[in-house]
Image: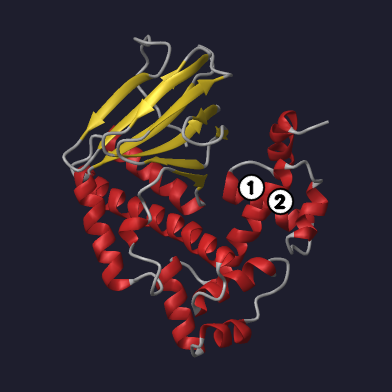
Amino acid sequence: MSTALPSQQPVDLIENRTLFARHAAELSIYDTFAPARDVPLRADELLYCAMTQGRKRMHGPHPAHDFLPHQSYVLAPGEQVLIDFPEATLQRPTRCLTIAVERERLRRLCDRLDRHAPLPRGLGTWQTVHRHSWHGHHSEATQGLLERIAGSFLQADADNDLVLDHGVDELLGRLLRQQGREFLLACAAAEPDHDPFSAVLDHIERHLAQPLDIERLCRLSCMSRTRFYARFAALLGCTPNAYLLERRLRRAAALLDRGMAVTRVAYEVGFQSPSHFSRRFQARYGIAPSRYRAHAAPSLPG
């Protein structure tokens, strides 16, 4: 994402903030122009963060991890993380976009999801999904949405408040769905027989390198084909094939983090050719798998 700001000398070298406020939300762009360690970030309301340039190292209540472009970080209200900036320079600052969202707005969206796409019985409500900080890669569609939201702040457009209002709701919906997927996957891994849908997700996860067997998934879910597709879309926000592709790419990123060769990773997660895998991976993460692996290499043992 390219976010153009007025040319000016930074007031602060560490987390220099440019604030854009509208009635619907508050967007900030933070530029850091020098290396730094243990810079605190605290959220009074839910804080959505997206990297647009450079690399941060996040730590605090969780193990340290890199925060890179095409990744999202959600800081829950009342929580705090510490940030390191190992590579920031005046010529190449580290840049992050944040959107602060009032809890009441999130509560209303969770209520809507609970009415129209409830979680499987016994797993609670959507209100429970967002209570902790969360970090992960976001999709190409979410990347495009972020660019539109940033543009609504930066452009003098008569409809920018309307664009922003709808954009923030869509962004929150995407985040909740993504967090919900992680939550459902954790439940399926811990207790695959808890309910039919846990069995479905567990089966997909254990057979990522194989084509989807829709008939088998319908039997596991105890649903007809039509009802299965409708329930899957309502709960996970995508088709089964789109979900399989996302999980394959997530598994691929984990294998590349461990230093596995790109060609081997492609076949390991079920792609028919390394070139097809590379195109899909770059579209999802904004970086070629070879470059992703090279970036992870310094932290690998040996």
Q: Position of residue 240 (x, y in %)?
A: 55, 72
Q: Are marks 2 and 1 in contact (CB under 8 Å)?
A: yes
Which residue does the image show at 45% across and 67% down from the upper left? 236
Q: Nearer the viewer, residue 53 or 71?
A: 71
Is 11 located above or below residue 193 in the figure?
above
In the rendered structure, the answer to whether residue 270 lies left or right of residue 250 reads: right
Q: Is residue 280 visible?
A: no
Q: CA distance from mark 2 to mark 1?
A: 6 Å
Is 51 located above or below residue 260 in the figure?
above
Q: Amino acid at mark 1?
A: Gln
In the rendered structure, the answer to whether residue 101 lies left or right of residue 131 reads: left
Which residue does the image show at 41% across and 73% down from the upper left? 120
* Structural crowding at the residue carrying mark 1, measured as other residues with C-alpha within 10 Å and reported as few (<14), some (14–19) or many (≥20): some
Q: Which residue is mark 2?
A: 278
Q: Amino acid at mark 2?
A: Ser
SS category of the residue bearing label 1: helix
Q: Position of residue 292 (x, y in %)?
A: 68, 39
In the rendered structure, the answer to whether residue 186 lies left or right of residue 75 reads: right
Quadrant where the image shows the C terminus: top right
Q: Which residue is mark 1?
A: 282
